[in-house]
Amino acid sequence: MSKPLYVILDNGHGQETPGKRSPVWPDGTQLFEYEFNRAIVNRVALGLTKAGIKVTRLVPELHDVSITERIIRANNIITAANRDGFQCLLVSVHANAGGGTGFEVLTSVGKTRSDELAEIFYQLAETVYLKNFPMRRDVLDGDSDKETNSVSILPKTNCPAVLTENLFMDTRKDCQLLMSDFGRDMIAEMHVKAIEEYARRYAGFNQ
Ligand SMILES: [Zn+2]
């Protein structure tokens, strides 16, 4: 029987991380990525718990926890969870920047199961949740706007891992959705549905 799933949610940057924010829009609003990432991660944690999937947040605090520390934390959680009979999955939630638009998923290289989860995400985004935005699929080769520090959490954690870049906070149309409760609920639901489908395929759903 396949092992039950233990999901580790990472919300990346902290309150004081430099950059990582939208411009101030003409109506005076501004998005801070740390706040958006946490809003999504908290919703996803709630949704997964309701679905009976075990979940933990890697960075419960508001301040910035370095990538090195996050990797150590993640691998400690993974070691303990494996010992307790779980298989782990790490999902890192972000908003993109650099003047583009759309949704993309980065995966840990050479881990086929993270590729599977990425495909599930793209399919849900394209057909249901982010139909009005482009899907960015070719980002691992030379796209300069990816966040290399955050990406390093992918190959260095000892479990399948994906990083979602949920639209662009410095593009007005994208950012409006990211600032709305409607958009946040939708993006969070997409993460819950994608992880549920992954659990169905690889962990057996009744845990
Ligand atoms: Zn980010």
Image (tube, rainbow, N blue to C red):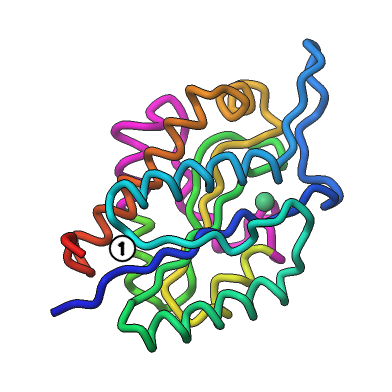
Name the spot of residue 63 as percent of width and height, x first: 78, 55
Name the spot of residue 200 as percent of width and height, x first: 19, 59
Name the spot of residue 108 as percent of width and height, x first: 49, 71
Q: Which residues are magenta?
A: 120-149
In which quadrant of the rendered image does the C terminus lie?
A: bottom left
Q: Where on the picture, by quarter, is residue 140? A: bottom right
* Residue at horizontal 74 percent and vertical 51 percent from the top: 62
* Residue type for callout 1: Glu
Name the spot of residue 26 as percent of width and height, x first: 80, 12
- Front residue of this view, candidates 131 and 79: 79
Q: Read off the residue under disc 1.
A: 116
Q: Is residue 196 above or below residue 161?
A: above
Q: Where on the picture, by quarter, is residue 69? A: bottom right
Q: Where on the picture, by quarter, is residue 199? A: bottom left
* Residue at horizontal 58 percent and vertical 80 percent from the top: 156
Q: Is residue 43 above or below residue 160?
A: above
SS majority, magenta? loop
Crowding at label 1, few (<14), some or many (≥20) Cα neighbours within 10 Å?
some
* Residue at horizontal 41 percent and vertical 64 percent from the top: 7
Q: Is residue 97 above or below residue 157?
A: above
